[in-house]
Image (cartoon, rainbow, N blue to C red):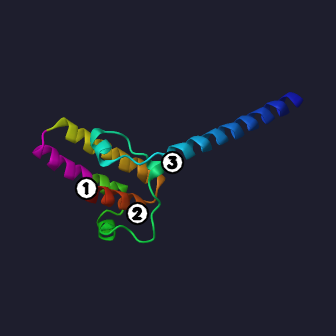
């Protein structure tokens, strides 16, 4: 019985230690800047933890886009149509890879943030290009 209690206490301490380590790593990752437009084109993964929290006022253009693209599934559908047209125009592998990487980053962000925040990010990113 005492052995089981010792093992339970050791397991609890391990979980506490891992939680502290995870919190420290998350804080360090959050300090890194989000990927630049060039890094996106080169296929570098964005830092979703560096995404600024959404304010109450969405980025200009986001509200009308939200009506047309209410969730990640609608975004992926529209993005696939956009990229297939673009890829037929620019038959270059780096363009296709960059567009696919960007879509992957949007999907990752949509799991971590509210959809309106991700859409704000997308609109801001596209306006910066």
Return the x and y of residue 38 as percentages of the image width and height: 28, 44
Mark 1 → mark 2, Cα distance in angstroms: 16 Å
Mark toward the viewer: 3 or 1: 3
Is 20 positioned to the left or the right of 64 in the image?
Answer: right
Residue 51 point in image, percent of width and height:
44, 54
Q: Nearer the viewer, residue 110 or 30?
A: 30
- The range drawn in magenta is 78-91
Q: Mark 1 points at which residue?
A: 78
Mark 3: secondary structure:
helix
Residue 71 seen by the camera: no
- The extreme top residue here reads 3
Q: Can you give x and y, in whole percent of width and height, for residue 74 in the image?
A: 31, 57
- Residue 87, x across and y down, in percent: 16, 44
Sequence-wise first label, 1 or 2: 1
Label 1: element kind: helix
Q: Mark 2 points at which residue?
A: 116
Name the quadrant of the C terminus.
Answer: bottom left
Q: Name the residue under label 3.
A: 30
Residue under the point 34% across and 47% down = 36
First along the sequence among labels 3 and 1: 3
Please state which of the two labelled residues, at mark 1 or mark 2, is closer to the viewer.
Answer: 2
Answer left or right for 123 relative to 16. left
Question: Residue 45: which disc?
Answer: none
Q: Mark 3 and mark 1 in contact? Answer it, CB < 8 Å.
A: no
- At mark 2, the secondary structure is helix
Q: Does the magenta-highlighted stretch encompass residue 125?
A: no
Q: Do the residues labelled 1 and 2 touch (CB within 8 Å)?
A: no
């Amino acid at each position: 019985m005492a052995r089981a209690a010792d093992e339970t206490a050791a397991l609890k301490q391990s979980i506490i230690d891992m939680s502290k380590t995870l919190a420290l790593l998350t804080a360090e990752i959050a300090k890194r800047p989000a990927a630049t437009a060039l890094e996106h084109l080169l296929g570098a993964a964005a830092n979703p933890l560096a995404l600024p929290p959404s304010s109450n006022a969405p980025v200009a253009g986001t509200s009308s886009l939200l009506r047309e693209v209410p969730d990640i599934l609608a975004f992926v559908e529209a993005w696939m149509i956009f990229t297939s047209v673009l890829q037929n125009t620019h038959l270059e592998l780096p363009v296709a890879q960059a567009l696919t990487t960007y879509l992957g980053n949007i999907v990752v962000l949509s799991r971590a943030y509210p959809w309106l925040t991700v859409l704000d990010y997308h609109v801001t990113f596209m306006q910066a290009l």
